[in-house]
Image (tube, rainbow, N blue to C red):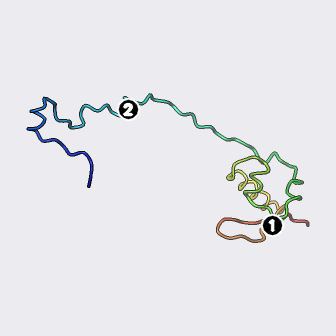
């Protein structure tokens, strides 16, 4: 298509330039300083939350809503809901494709 063409050897000799093979370019490792990134571990023990009154006010309990209310990651909220479901505090009422909806169990 378009772009810069590679010059022939005869034209580079006439101008006095050396052909560029890409050997004079600096490597990527040399141009950027090495920065070690520290991964932040999120260690929240959600089992310590014994206040279930937060769930009673919700019309439909979803993983996303619990994550938003408690201010934790969705994976942690998902584990919390599974824990509550195994205890019988909430029950599964519907949902599809991983978007499960729960309700507070009154009994």
Does label 2 or label 1 sit earlier along the sequence? 2
Question: In this view of the protein, which residue sits in the foreground, 36 or 79?
Answer: 36
In the rendered image, the vertical position of residue 13 relative to residue 98, given as above or below: above
Q: Nearer the viewer, residue 69 or 90?
A: 69
Q: Residues within 10 Å of mark 2 (few under 14, many from 20)?
A: few
Which residue: 20% across, 37% down?
21
Circle 1 sits on which residue?
A: 91
Crowding near the residue tagged with mark 1, few <14, some 14–19, many ≥20 C-alpha atoms within 10 Å: some
Return the residue nearer the eye: 62 or 21: 21
Q: Residue at x 26, y 55 (%)?
A: 1
Q: Foreground residue, 105 or 13?
A: 13
Which mark's residue is nearer the viewer, 2 or 1? 2
The residue carrying mark 2 is: 29
Residue 78 on image: x %, y %: 71, 56
Q: Quadrant of the C terminus?
A: bottom right
Q: At which x and y percent is residue 5?
A: 21, 46
Where is residue 103, by image quadrant? bottom right
Find numbered disc 2 in the image and state the secondary structure of the residue it sits on: helix
Q: Where is residue 66 shown, x and y percent of the image? A: 77, 54
Instruction: State the image coordinates of residue 83 (x, y, percent, origin top left).
Output: 76, 56
User: Tag 1, which secondary structure?
Assistant: strand
Q: Quadrant of residue 24?
A: top left
């Amino acid at each position: 298509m378009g772009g810069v063409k590679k010059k022939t050897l005869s034209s580079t000799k006439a101008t006095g330039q050396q052909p560029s093979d890409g050997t004079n370019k600096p490597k990527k490792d040399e141009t950027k300083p090495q920065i070690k990134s520290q991964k932040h571990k999120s260690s929240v023990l959600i089992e310590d939350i014994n206040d279930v009154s937060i769930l009673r006010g919700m019309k439909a309990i979803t993983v996303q809503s619990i994550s938003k209310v408690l201010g934790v990651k969705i994976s942690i909220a998902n584990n919390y809901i599974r824990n509550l479901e195994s205890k019988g505090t909430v029950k599964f009422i519907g949902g599809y494709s991983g978007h499960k909806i729960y309700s507070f169990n009154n009994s």
